[in-house]
């Protein structure tokens, strides 16, 4: 991957202080998503270690959907959404997990054949709870997880201790 293109893409991520609460530095990927070259660069960088090893990209709601769509198109794979509870008309599996500020449940339909090779993606790896729940959900439904990738990892929060190895394009 071209280091200059990656540096340019990373520079498009805005840092918003004190959002959603005081003391938090929110990383807003909206400017990056709006830039065609930047989006193409990060999609390829996220998929690169897994090329040829997956049939479908599963994205975790909501920003993970956006990245999963870009990766799916760039790699010629399908897309499978992992949704928040209550958003799917026919969920086949669900996993509840703890967040820093409460709990959540994610769901997925079983539209893929058993054994489908899936690359799981999301925007940020923080504490690892959401990605671990996504992994458990894919396993529950009988899919083969061939990798997990994120746009950025907040390394100080230790998410890889919870969900195992995760490929991240940027580390903060």
Image (tube, rainbow, N blue to C red):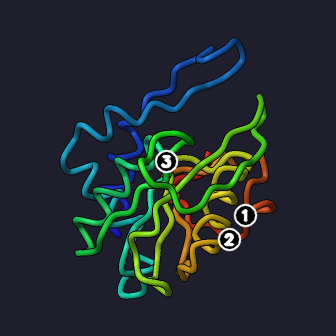
* 114 versus 57 height, above or below: below
Front label number (3 vs 2) = 3
User: Which label was assigned to residue 165?
Assistant: 2
Cβ–Cβ below 8 Å for labels 3 and 1? Answer: no
Q: Is residue 125 left or right of residue 23?
A: left
User: Which residue is the site of mark 1?
Assistant: 163
Q: Which one is in front, 14 or 139?
A: 139
Q: Is residue 119 left or right of residue 42?
A: right
Residue sitting at x 41%, y 55%: 81
Please state the horizontal and vertical placement of residue 147, each as a whole percent of the image: 54, 75
Residue sitting at x 75%, y 38%: 99
Front label number (2 vs 1) = 1
Residue sitting at x 73%, y 69%: 164
Q: Secondary structure at mark 3?
A: strand
The quadrant holding residue 25 is: top right
* 41 versus 20 height, above or below: below
Which corner quadrant holds the C terminus? top right
What crowding class fits label 3: few (fewer than 14 Cα within 10 Å), some (14-19), or many (20 or more)? many
Q: Which one is in front, 109 or 82?
A: 109
């Amino acid at each position: 991957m071209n280091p200059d293109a990656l540096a340019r893409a990373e520079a498009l991520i805005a840092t918003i202080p004190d959002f959603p609460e005081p003391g938090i530095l929110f990383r807003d990927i909206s400017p990056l998503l709006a830039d065609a070259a930047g989006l193409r660069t990060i999609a390829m960088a996220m998929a690169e270690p897994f090329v040829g090893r997956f049939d479908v990209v599963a994205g975790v709601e909501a920003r993970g959907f956006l990245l999963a769509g870009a990766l799916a198109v760039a790699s010629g794979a399908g897309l499978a959404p992992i949704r928040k509870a209550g958003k799917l008309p026919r969920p086949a599996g669900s996993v509840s997990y703890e967040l820093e500020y409460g709990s959540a449940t994610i769901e997925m339909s079983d539209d893929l054949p058993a054994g489908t090779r899936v690359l799981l993606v999301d925007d940020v790896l923080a504490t690892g709870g959401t990605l671990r729940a996504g992994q458990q959900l894919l396993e529950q439904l009988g899919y083969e997880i061939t990798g997990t990738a994120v746009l950025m990892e907040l390394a100080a929060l230790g998410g890889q201790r919870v969900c195992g190895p995760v490929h991240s394009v940027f580390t903060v």
